[in-house]
Amino acid sequence: MPRYAYIAIAASGRKAKGTITAESPYAARKQLRVRSIHPTSITEVGVADEGRAALTSFFSKGGKRQIIDFTKQMAILLNSGIKLTEALSVLTMQASDARFKNTLTDMRDRVVTGESLTDAMKDHEDYFDIIYVSMVRVGEVTGSLGGIFNTIADFMGKRQKVESKIITAMVYPVILIIFSVVVILVLTTFVIPKIGAQLVAAKMELPWITRQLMNVGHVMRSWWALLALAVIVALAWGLKRFFKTQRGAYLRDRVLLSLPLFGSLLKQRVVSRFTSTLSTLLSSGLSMAESLRVVAEVTGNTLMKRAVGQARERILAGADIATPLRDSGVIDPVIAHMVTVGEKSGELESMLKNISESLEESTDIVIERLSAAVEPLIIIFIAIVVMIIALATILPILKISSMAV
C-alpha cells in the first residue's frame, strides 16, 4: 500500500506534517479529515525517497537504538507526571533524525486530535512493531503507560544485547575471510600470471602448482567467471523468492534447525525469543490468547509460528499450550514440561522468564565456544591457502633467479 507525505493544519491551528498509508491520495485525505487534520499538500513517497530516508535514519543514529532511547525517555517523562501530548512534543523537538521527527510529529498531532497512541503508532510499523503496539494498547487501557514503556525498554534492551553478542562474535571471522578472499583474488588473477608469463617468455617449465593457479586465475578473468557469478545470483534470487513462500520458509527453517552445531544455537535463539516475548506480554497484562497471536507474528521461525498458532487454538478450546509446543520439534521436552508445570502452578510468567534467562546464558556459552573453535579453523585454512599461493609464487621467482646467475 502506498505511503503519502502530507502537510496539513491540525485542529489546534498549528501546522502538521508526516506520512500516512492509504490506497490513494483521496483515501489519505479522508483519513486525515477524520482526525480533524486538514491537508494542504499530499505527495506520494517514492521508493527512492523512502530508501534515502531509511539510509539517513540508519547512519544518523541507528534504528533500534533510537527507538530504545525514545522508549526510555517516554517512560521517564510519563512517570514524572507529564502528560502524553506534552511528552511527545518534548521528544519531537529534540529528535535529531528528520524521518523519526516526522513520525513523532504525526503521532503527537493525532493524539492531540483525540486519537489513541496505539492508533497513531500503527501507521508507523517501520519503528513500532506489533509487540510494541500491543503493549502500548494495554498501557492505555489500564492507565499504566509509564510502566509499560519501562517494560518495553527493558525488553528491547535485553534483545539488542543478545543480538549484539552474536554480531560481535561474527565480526572478526567475517573480516578475516573477506580480507583473505581479496588477497587470494589479487594474487591469483594478477601476480602469479605475470610471473608465469615471464617464465613462459624465457621458455622455462612452470612448476605444477603455479600452472594450476594460473589456470584458476585464467578462469576467474574469463567470461566463465561472469557466467558462474550470474548463475549464483540467479540461484540466490530464486531461493529468496522460494523462501518467501510458506513451503519454502518451512523447509528453510527445518533445515537450519537441523544443522550440526549451528542448529542448536538457532533453536535456542528461537525458543529464547518466544519465551521472553510471551513472558513480557503476559506481565504487561495482555491475555494469553492475544499474547500468543502477537508472538506468532514475530517468532521469526515458521515451525515455531505453527506451534504457537496451534497452542492458541488449544487455549481458546480450553486445553493446554505445552502439547503443540512439544510436538513442534523446536522446543525440547524438558522446556515443554517446565511450561506445563508453570501452567498448572499459575506461575507461567515467571517460569517463561526463567527459561528465557537460562537459554540466554546457554546461548552466550555456545557463542563463545563457537568463536573459540571457528577462528582457529579459519586461520588454519587461510594459512594453508597462503602457503600454496606462496609456493606458486616463490618457486618461479627462484627459477628466474637461478637463470640470472
Image: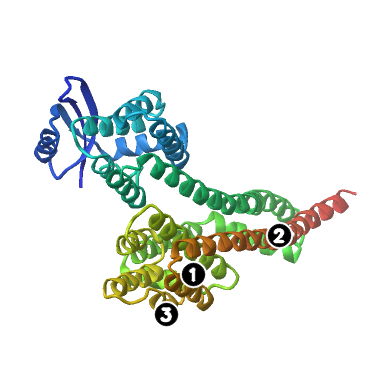
Residue at 65% x, 61% y is: 365
Label 3 CA crowd tier, 10 Å (few <14, some 14–19, many 20+): few
User: Looking at this rendering, what residue extends furthest in the front direction?
Assistant: 345
Label 1: which secondary element = helix
Label 3 or label 1, whichever comes before in sequence order: 1
User: Residue 303's spot in the image, x, y percent?
Assistant: 40, 71
Instruction: Establish if 348 lies above or below 85.
Output: below
User: Residue 23's spot in the image, x, y percent?
Assistant: 14, 45
Label 3: which secondary element = helix
Alpha-carbon span between mark 3 and mark 2: 34 Å
Instruction: Establish if 239 lies above or below 89.
Output: below
User: Looking at this rendering, what residue extends furthest in the right direction?
Assistant: 405
Q: Nearer the viewer, mark 3 or mark 2?
A: 3
Q: Is residue 28 visible?
A: yes
Alpha-carbon span between mark 2 and mark 1: 22 Å
Instruction: Kindly identify which residue carries mark 2.
Output: 372
Instruction: Kindly identify which residue carries mark 3.
Output: 327
Label 2: which secondary element = helix
